[in-house]
Image (spheres, rainbow, N blue to C red):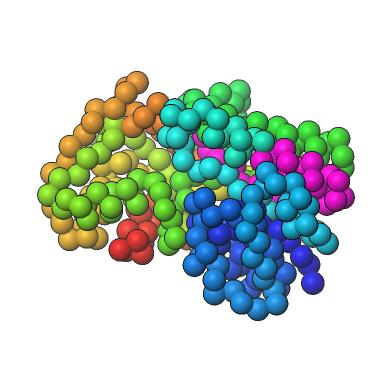
Amino acid sequence: MNTVLVTGGAGFIGSHLIDRLISNGYFVRCLDNFSSGKKEYVSHHKNKDFKLIEGDVLDEKTLRSSMDDCKTVFHLSANPDVRLGEKDTKVHFQQNIQATYTVLETMRQCEIKNIVFTSTSTVYGDAKELPTPEDYGPLVPISLYGASKLACEALISSYCHTFGMKSVIYRFANVVGSRSTHGVTYDFVQKLKKNPQELEILGDGRQMKSYLYITDCIEAMMFGLSKSTKNVEIFNIGSEDWIDVREIADVVSQVMGVHPSYHFTGGIDGGRGWKGDVKAMRLSIDLLKKMGWRPRYASREAIKLTAQEIL
C-alpha cells in the first residue's frame, strides 16, 4: 500500500485529511503531540490502515521512525494561532520554521521525495490586488505567523531544487467546519454561550475575509495533488466570495437563536482586530478552477454550517 505520514494529523484539518486518505486506500501514519490536536478526532480509525504516533516533529528520532517506508509527507504540524505571535515571538519560529526544517532534513536523510505543505493566505500580507493570485508579489506578511509560513515555503522550495524533491504548497483562506477549535466563528459561539445578551467583536466589524468549508478544503487538496506537475506547485484554496465580521456575528446569533447587542472594540491600525490581522483577504482560485475544481459552499454557508456543528 502507499504509506504516507501526516504531521499534525489529529488537528482540525489534519484529521479530515486522514479520513479522506484512508478512504482513498492509503496507509496513514499520524504524528501529533496533541498540543492542539485531539485523539478523539482520529480514534475511529482502528484498522491496519492507520497508525497513531504520539510525538513531536522536533524529535528527530521519532520523526525518522515515523517516516519509515513512507512515500509522501503531508506536513500540517504548526501552531495555528495567528494572534499568539504578538505575545510569544518564539512559538511560530519553533513550531513552524524549525519544525519544517526538521521535517525536510529528515526526509532528505530518508530519501523521501514528496511533501505536501499547508500554508496560508497571510503570506500575502495586506495585498493590494483582491482577489489575490498565486503570482502576486512582493509578499510582505504583517504577522509572525504569516512570516513563519512564508519562511517554510522558501525552505521547501530550496530543498526541492537542491535535493530533487517535489512539493505541493496550499495557501488557505480561513478554513472552518467540524472539529475546529479556534477562529472567529468558534470564538463567537463560546462568547454567546457565556453571555447571549452581548457579543464583543474585535476591531470595527468591517474586516472582510473569505471562509472555506472543510470538505471543500480537503477536496481541493486532493484535486490539486492529482493535477500537480511542477517540482514546486503553489495553489490558493478559498471560496469565491467573502464576508465581514459583523455578518458572521449575525449568522452565528441566528443559528443560536439569540439577539445580542454588539460591542466593537474599535481595533487598531484602522480597525484591525489585533496586530497582524489582515483586514481584507480574498484569494483568487482561478488556477484550480481552470483545472476543474470549485468550492461547493460560499462563505456565509460555511459559517452557518460551522456554527451548527460547534453547537
Judge left or right: residue 95 versus residue 168.
left
* Relative to 47, residue 55 above or below: above
Query: Left of 89 or right of it: where is 264?
Result: left
Residue 303 on image: x %, y %: 35, 54
- State yes or no: residue 114 in magenta: yes
Any part of residue 135 in sight: no
**Quadrant of the snapshot with the N terminus:** bottom right
Spot occupied by residue 209 in the image (x, y as percentages of width and height) = 40, 40
Q: Residue at x 28, y 49 (%)?
A: 188
User: Residue 86, position in %: x, y?
Assistant: 44, 28
Q: Residue drawn at (28%, 35%), measured in percent from left and top?
A: 202
Residue 160 visible in the displayed image: yes
Residue 267 falls in image quadrant: top left
The structure residue drawn at horizontal position 12% and vertical position 49%, both measured from the top left corner, is: 197
Q: Residue at x 73, y 53 (%)?
A: 62
**Range drawn in magenta:** 99-123
> How many numbered discs sit on the rendered protein?
0
